[in-house]
Image (cartoon, rainbow, N blue to C red):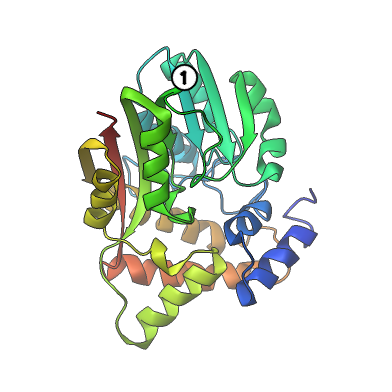
Amino acid sequence: MTRLGTAWTAEHVRHVGEIFRQGRNPAARVYESIGPDFFLAPAPGWLNLGLWDGDGAGLADEAEAACRRLVETIASALPPGGVIVDVGNGLGVQDPLIAELVRPRRLVAVNITERQLVAGRPRLAEASAAPVAGDAARLPIAEGAADGVISVEAAFHFSSRKAFFEECHRVLRPGGVVTMSDISTERRPLGPAELLSGLTQLRVFGLRLTAAMTARQIAAAAAAAGLADVQVTWCGDRVIAPALRLASARLSSAPAAPAGHLAVARLLLAQVDLLWRRHIIDYILLRATRP
């Protein structure tokens, strides 16, 4: 893949094309265009927003620790020594950490795009993880084969959270755990600025309208799929707020990026900031078990 800091790539062009005419798998186009050199990644290779102890202002040196903390917090619910499925594993940086924390008998990394699996091959090898190209709504995992399912900051991209939770119920053994983070939409946008911001984010990030669910709706979908002991924790103040401050600081330093990327990034950042400040979006952690 061409380095993001030096030129536009064919993946970027396909991503832009899908903004105007979405194909069958818009999320894959988004993530094919995000490589290990993504200039707004909190830390090299890490695509999650992080779970911060500070406010994100001038804390670039703590970004990797925040990203690791988020994965550690989510993974802490996983049963040790079992079969673990990481759904939407990004560039694979989180998988060695999951392997270190949980010591799974087997770790399977499922990703909608093969390009990210290829980019993450060294880290998957380090974690002894099996890479699988697959859809979260149709997991290529046998019924009752898994002890735990983890998904870090990916579910809003899934074609259906309902289908994902039903798949979790199917692939988990009784007593198995699903643990994840997600971005919720706590209310519908109102007025031109909010509507434009919301719709732009949907198109740019390849999201469907059904991705807009409140935390309580997400929890209800998990319960409706047969999962039990559903627990939700809101933590946008430790995730979205500091990540926005860090991204803003990065953009103000004019990082090397292809022509047009910086202007688009500033616009999208301003829109996300508006959605956060007006309490439209939030960040949640969810845990549930298979009875």
- Image point 24% across, 44% down: which residue? 223
**Residue at 33 percent of width and 28 percent of height:** 177
Direction from residue 237 to residue 19 in the image, left or right: right
Report the front residue among 226 and 34.
226
Q: Residues within 10 Å of mark 1 (few under 14, many from 20)?
A: many
Residue on which the image places disc 1: 83
Q: Is residue 185 shown to the viewer in this render?
A: yes
How many marks the image carries: the answer is 1
Residue 116 in which image quadrant: top right
Q: Name which quarter of the figure residue 257 lies in.
A: bottom right
Q: Is residue 221 above or below residue 18?
A: above
Q: Report the front residue among 262 and 13.
A: 13
Classify 67 as above or below 239.
Answer: above
Q: Residue at x 43, y 31 (%)?
A: 171
The answer to which of 275 and 187 lies nearer the viewer is: 187
* Mark 1: amino acid: Val
- Farthest residue to the bottom: give it: 192
- Image quadrant holding the C terminus, namely top left
Place of residue 127 in the rendered image (x, y in percent of width and height, measured from the top left): 58, 20
- Rendered view: 69 above or below 285: above
Q: Is residue 289 left or right of residue 115?
A: left
Residue 175 falls in which quadrant of the image?
A: top left
Q: Position of residue 43 (x, y in %)?
A: 55, 41
- Return the x and y of residue 16 as percentages of the image width and height: 67, 70
Note whether residue 70 is visible: no
**What residue lies at 27% left-to-right and 35% top-to-bottom?**
288
Residue 270 rendering spot, x and y as whole percentages: 44, 71
Q: Secondary structure at mark 1?
A: strand
- Nearest the viewer among 197 and 63 is 197
